[in-house]
């Protein structure tokens, strides 16, 4: 399948995907070896544990959708009978955040929408070290948010594609991810993404079939080429110290 189609992401929509630890252990061991793709999956907050988060991370999970039904405790637990305390939801988000796995929640989770949101306009928030040189580089909002509310299935699809973008993408991987992000944004919103310039590091990242259109957008935004780094936040990981 990977040889025939340019697949960059697997999506699992089973609401009970993480219910059995023994199954998740086997999956996290075999999936990276036999498939080797990052994946998105659905989770329930009351099924999240540190062990399961670690297994998701090991298996290649890069985004999850967490159904909390409502940010209103009375509505969620009384009317909808979810029996899920707010602390459970917040703690699940915290554990996923620590693992660097973004969470998407529906519109009824709007009470939590201020959790773990990034600021794409604050360039200093996206600076990391290039482990090869020790230089500080801006990698852009990749991912921009770790806990995000989405209002519609269409917005969710676009957000999944966007949140898959990572600082350590190769030029080929970034090109494919941008192609997916642009295609879905055009399909559901009818326009090119307004923040496209934030995700192009060099012209090698630009999908070849869209090169002219994207180049015009980059020129209009005053975009400047940077580098494709080996990103790290830890000074001890720098292989060559800056002189």
Image: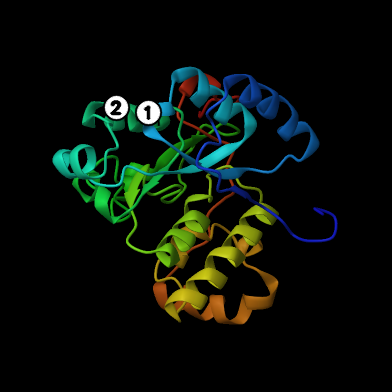
Q: Quadrant of residue 204?
A: bottom right
Looking at the image, which residue sits at the far right?
3
The crowding category of the residue bearing disc 1, from other C-alpha atoms within 10 Å (few below 14, some 14 to 19, many at least 20), is: some
CB atoms at circles 2 and 1 under 8 Å apart?
yes
For image coordinates 52% across by 54% down, the residue present is 226
Question: On the image, numbered disc 1 is attached to which residue?
Answer: 46
Percent position of residue 94, x then y: 33, 28
For image coordinates 23% across by 26% down, the residue present is 87
Q: Is residue 240 left or right of residue 69?
A: right
For image coordinates 45% across by 29% down, the residue present is 233
Q: Label 2, label 1: how many angstroms apart (C-alpha)?
A: 6 Å
Circle 2: element type:
helix
Percent position of residue 33, x then y: 78, 32
Q: Name the foreground residue: 144 vs 32.
A: 32
The crowding category of the residue bearing disc 2, from other C-alpha atoms within 10 Å (few below 14, some 14 to 19, many at least 20), is: some
Circle 1: element type:
helix
Percent position of residue 196, x then y: 46, 66
Question: On the image, numbered disc 2 is attached to which residue?
Answer: 88
Q: Is residue 72 left or right of residue 7?
A: left
Does 87 sit above or below residue 145? above
């Amino acid at each position: 399948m990977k040889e025939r189609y340019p697949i960059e992401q697997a999506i699992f929509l089973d609401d009970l995907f993480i219910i059995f630890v023994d199954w998740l252990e086997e999956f996290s061991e075999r999936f990276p070896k036999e498939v080797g793709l990052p994946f998105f999956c659905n989770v329930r907050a009351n099924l999240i544990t540190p062990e399961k988060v670690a297994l998701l991370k090991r298996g290649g999970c890069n985004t999850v959708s967490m159904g909390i039904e409502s940010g209103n405790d009375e509505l969620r637990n009384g009317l909808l009978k979810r029996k899920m305390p707010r602390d459970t939801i917040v703690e699940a988000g915290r554990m996923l955040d620590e693992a660097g796995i973004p969470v998407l929640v529906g519109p009824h989770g709007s009470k939590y929408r201020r959790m773990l949101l990034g600021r794409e306009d604050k360039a200093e928030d996206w600076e990391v070290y290039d482990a090869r040189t020790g230089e500080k580089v801006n990698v852009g909002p990749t991912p921009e948010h770790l806990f995000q509310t989405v209002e519609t299935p269409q917005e969710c699809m676009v957000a999944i594609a966007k949140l898959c973008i990572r600082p350590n993408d190769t030029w080929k991987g970034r090109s494919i991810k941008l192609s997916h992000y642009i295609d879905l944004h055009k399909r559901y919103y009818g326009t090119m993404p307004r923040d496209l310039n934030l995700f192009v590091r060099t012209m090698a990242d630009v999908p070849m079939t869209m090169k002219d259109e994207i180049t015009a957008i980059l020129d209009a935004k005053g975009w400047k080429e940077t580098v494709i780094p080996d990103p790290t936040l830890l000074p001890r990981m720098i292989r060559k110290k800056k002189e």
